[in-house]
Image (tube, coloured by chain):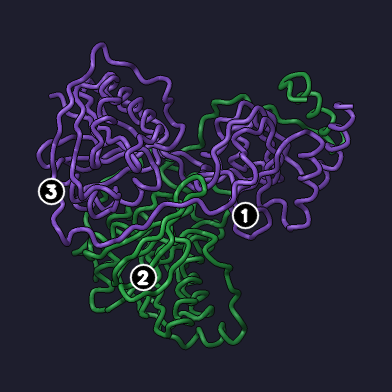
Amino acid sequence: MKILVCMKQVPQKDAPLKLNEAGTWIREDVSYEVNEPDAFALEEALRQKEKHTGEVVVVTAGPARASQVLREALAKGADRAIHLEDAAFVGLDAYNTARAIAAAIKDEKFDLIFTGLQSDDYGYAQTGVILAEILGWPHATIIMHIEKNDAGIRVKRELEAGFFQYVDVPLPAVLTIQSGINKLRYATLIGIKQAKTKPMRKVTLAEVQSAVGANLQKIEKLYVPQKSKNTEFLEGPPAEVAKKLVEKLKNELRVI
Amino acid sequence: MAENILVIVEQREGKLNRVSWETIAAGQAIAALTGWTLEAGVVGSGVSAIAGEVAAKKVARVYDVESPGLEPYTPDAFVHGLREFLGKHPAALVLMPHTYQVRDFVPKLAAAFETTAISDVIGVKNEGGKLIFTRQMFQGKFVADVSFAGTGVCFVTFQNGSFRADKVEAGAAAAPVETVTVEIPAGVVRNKPQEVFKEAKQAVDLTQAEIIVSVGRGIKEQKNIELAKQLADAIGGELAASRPICDSGWLPMDRQIGSSGQTVAPKLYLALGISGAIQHIVGMKGSRSIVAINKDAEAPIFEIADYAVVGNLFDIVPVLIEEVKKARS
């Protein structure tokens, strides 16, 4: 099984984020990490490779710092990496990101392409599905299990409120992977060492420029949400806060 | 010139997904902002009854987009059918609820039209004649005002609870219903879906709980869940959790609150060590009152909390349990 995993680098979950001067994006001087659903997608690809043999290739589109995500993936067991390297990739919308990836992989022959179901920064949940449309491939989203069968694969698709559905999908296909599909592995010291010699192919923006167009959405303004609620912060040492809170629960909210 | 707004309501296995009323409310709000014409559509096989239900609302027309190939739902069939329908009945804006089913096909449909989908929108406004869609980013830490920068059709999906179903205006008379048959040729549908099923044995129905004590990643270890359980018992509530806790197996799946789990609206939702990621918030933002304890003053959960405590839950909860017991005795 030849599997491509699309991975994104996003600000760390608990990183304090600040708006830039123009109020159109965040200040980029924060710590970054792999987008968590993408880590689950990588883990799933590695497990499928372990079960069926094959190759796992990881790709990201972002500035130089994003190669960290690829290095970590190689250390965990991916075979090679593709870095669409340019700061401009951060600002591309999902449609253009998908077009850029499709252009970069046009000479490859993957059986499966995984993405995380959505990214923690934009939260669009679209790149994988758009990629399927560009490639003309079938797809399935929010996947919690993958099993190979004669017709291709049988996937378990997550629905709302605890419901699920199995779907038979022919290959090649794009799947967007849900968090919690598996348990993430840690890279071993040997893995980290081996990662240094695994192939990392760089792709410039110029190489995929003809595939990419203008963004069809524009972020006019990014800002701190206006509060519609009057939140009362209770302060003091734990014993005092506990007393205050119980007083509110009893007399204001009337729940005890 | 008046443009068309089209709301595609969602049906699953012949039943209207009631979140669709929120999308109709959104459509009515946008029609009021722009003066455009609001129409609605339902897509499926044998769904005329749903079209009739929608026609009772204040919309100019309802389309019943029919084909046997549209049941069961597959992304290929829905994209093919809607491409044909929208080709015959163009719209400037196509609105849908941000459900798992819509997420499965709308990006493909938008790309097929070489346009974009603005997804998970929580509000709309008119700024100097330009429609601005507001959506959360960075897991709720910020919001973005987004505009459509293309020409032609724009798809928009709305977050659960962003508009109110009870605000939908009824029509003075039933709107006309037009049946439009579309063709789904053999070979278009590539996926073979099986039956939808529920996995977890529903041992507890969190939607019936009046008080919920919910834990997130801030609980740190499985053994600490016991502390939250003690608080739940003391206050007479049910224990619940955000997704990562259930993924780790620390609590069963039927305790999960969020887009993949239960949506609840109890009298009191007590969030312990929950940051407030969007996927969790959509499952509990309708709670009558929300109390949050988190050591991160910037946690998005505080935006929707009535009472907020910035602090270490391991210091606060033990004392809180004692105070609750005292108050209830």
Label the green chain with its letter: A
Residue on which disc 3 sits: B183
Judging depth in this view, the residue of B160 and B56 nearest the camera is: B56
For the residues labelled 2 and 3, the Cα–Cα distance comes to 27 Å
Residue on which disc 2 sits: A153
Residue type highlighted by circle 3: Glu
Return the x and y of residue B126 as percentages of the image width and height: 31, 25
Return the x and y of residue B20 as percentages of the image width and height: 36, 32
Q: Is disc 1 placed on a helix, strand or loop?
A: helix
Q: Indicate the quadrant containing the C terminus of chain B: top left, top right, bottom left or bottom right.
A: top right
Instruction: Please report the residue visible at 72 percent of the width from the left and 51 percent of the height from the top.
Output: B219
Return the x and y of residue B5 as percentages of the image width and height: 22, 30
**Left or right, A193 with reference to B45:** right
For the residues labelled 3 and 1, the Cα–Cα distance comes to 42 Å
Q: Is disc 2 placed on a helix, strand or loop?
A: strand
Q: Indicate the quadrant containing the N terminus of chain B: top left, top right, bottom left or bottom right.
A: top left
Q: Colour of chain B?
A: purple
